[in-house]
Amino acid sequence: MTSESPISAAPVQAAPFSGLLAIFAVAIFVSAALLFAVQPMFTKMVLPQLGGAAAVWSVALVFFQTALLAGYAYAHLITRLVPGRRSLLIHIAVNVIACFALPLHIAQGFGPPPQSGEAAWLLGLFAMSIGLPFFALAANGPLLQAWFARTSHPAAKDPYFLYAASNAGSFLALVSYPVAIEPFIRLGPQTWLWTAGFYLLIALVAACGVLMLRYRGTAAQDEIEAAAPPRWSDIAWWVFLAAVPSGFLIAVTAHIATDVAAVPLLWVLPLALYLVTFVIVFQTRPVIPHSLVVRVQPVFILALVAAFVLGPIESIVASITLHLSVFFVCVLMCHGELARRRPPARYLTGYYMWISVGGTIGGIATGLVAPHVFNWIAEYPLLLLFAVLCRPGLAWPSRGSGQYALFGALAAGLLVLIAAVAFDLQPGTSLLYVIVGLLIGLTVHFWQKPLSFAAIVAVVFVVNLSFRENQTIHLVRNFFGVLSVVDSSNGQYRGLWHGTTSQGTQKMRDDDGNPIKGRPEMISEFFEGAGIDQVFKAVQARKNGPIDYAVIGLGTGTLACQRRPGDTLTYYEIDPDIVRIASDPKLFGFVAECAPDAPITVGDARLKLADAPDASYDLIMIDAFIGAAIPVHLLTREAIALYLRKLRPDGLIAMHISNKNLELASVVAGVAEANGVIARVYDGGDVEEDAERYLWVPRVAAIARREQDFGALAKSEYWPVYERDASQRVWSDDYSNVVGAVLRNLRNRNQSGGN
């Protein structure tokens, strides 16, 4: 997102009307608060339509940036073409028209999202649902400041200081939403409160317009008109310095949301930091000097580069801290350069408009274009390179500077690397660390040369990509993320990965290296004798005949091989590319060998399962929570109620809740109790893991209406009843506490001595 304007405080003397400044400040504050509160609020409302995918927020940010640009352009044009009374009347009319879209709701006429083109569908939904109110709010910041600049108030000649009110409203709205609003107020009342705030804002905007006309100034206006216009080179820098942080915002938010969950708290953290950078850099005396930021930025960039080379950080807290720290410093540096280049007040609205143009370009490039251009998350390292190029001093090197020698050496090294890859030479990991260490060491000499620094970082990324020990045989990127099919170094095992999370593994060769044909062996968390296998055996034994079961989350299709003769299986999977991968016998054999005729329903499981007849299944298995970004809406009180309706009277609900970041057993216990049913949880203890054979002990929750419905599980000491923690609020479609689940997981790992 592009923030609304900068600070440059001016001394305020006696005003012609003592409340003039206060009314303008309050109006800008309320407008910014509404503008930024609606973003997580409405996106959360839309999230279940697309399976809780982290990409929903990325596309939402693109919409907000584009709508913000439209509002800024409108403010710029109305200020230039129809100033004074007419601008007031036009803007009040725009706000009144926007009221017809209130209270906030999902526009009618939007059915289930398509299986392709989800981003375009989502942009259309946002535009039709909240486009008009958001557009009206977006215009308020620059327009009200331009109106204030036309008053006779002593501070009118430098209205940039009103950014303090704008930023305060934006920041407080963002921070308060996941902390003080979302946990306590349901979505319905939230929309009505927001609507009341919008009506109040119309009155405040009208009051500002009246004050502008009543206390119109002349001296300050003459001084403003005398200012020299910006050059096109200035505008180009404004756009570039705004585009890089905007793209970085979407990239880092998607990365964090994908590693934990697509929830408002993890959306607003990067956006709040983004806004704070504007506050810092546009102060008269920044609390963090720009010169200091320029000096320390290379250290932060190299720390993140090292994390890319060494692999993902196990601790989710440490990982988020690193990514947000690098993001904050890079954005602070870019916005610091942007602040140094701000124009006189006469060009205030144009300055905001061009900043918004840059923000929109960065958002579209990262959120919409990159997923179609790259089959992996290439935009993240590219944005690091662009952040380096935003540093002061960017220029072609002079003769004799040594930079041309560096470029030649780097090019020669890349040629050697290309030759090694062409001849199928696979250097060891130790050599990778040596090469990367030497390259990073070069930055000590070239850190003040943006072009050379960027070239070194680029070569580090290329070298790192070339030193992969595992073999990727299939790679695809779509709205839901990056899917890769990867063979182990010895070719014995093949796994499906969604980002950095395994979605299942198949043993392709026996211990002698011979290809395995026929029914695949059940491994990973699904191996024989472990919790998931016990669930199927318990239901099959209790039914004493064929069963009907549904599986939410296809993965590699492993659970197809739990089907016995006479059983019926229905899969529910939101990602069509996973369907194509799991169904391709050249990649995985579970579906092809065990259930080639099983229907696979593509779409969000809750929406699709709602269409199934009631009492259809003996077992509903939800295998959608092992990944980092869990679909929260599949684990709520309302979701369990839906599953129970689709379950036969003596049926069983099972959930695979193994998760490296979140503790979900207590969540299951809460939603089960809220529906009047019983939850049992399996943590292992009766089987052992074997990493060499890809056998992992799963954590599994089972839910049933009565004790006898659990069958053999009720008699097992490894399946205890899990009581709800009364201190935890039950998750619902209007409430979830992912942060609490993260903290519980960290506490449990510390108590057990885990890392």
Image: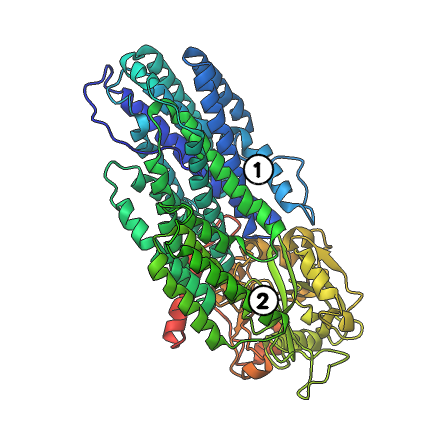
Q: Earlier in the sequence, mark 1 or mark 2?
A: 1
Outermost residue, left side = 13
Residue 152 found in image quarter = top left
**In percent of the image, x 55 and y 32: which residue is there?**
131
Residue lying furthest front: 400
Residue 735 picture location, percent across and down: 48, 50
Quadrant occupied by the N terminus: top left
- The amino acid marked with disc number 2 is Ile
Q: Residue 251, how many percent across, how many down?
A: 49, 51
Badge 1 amino acid: Phe
Q: Is residue 563 left or right of residue 436?
A: right
Specify few, some or many for label 2: CA neighbours under 10 Å numbering under 14, 14-19, or 20 or more.
some
Residue at point 27% right, 37% down? 283
User: Residue 101 appears in which quarter of the rendering?
Assistant: top right
Q: Quadrant of the C terminus?
A: bottom left
Q: Residue 152 versus residue 444: which sits nearer the camera?
A: 444
Q: Decide which of 39, 472 is in the foreground and name it.
A: 472
Q: To which residue does mark 1 refer?
A: 126
Q: Is residue 335 above or below residue 251?
A: above
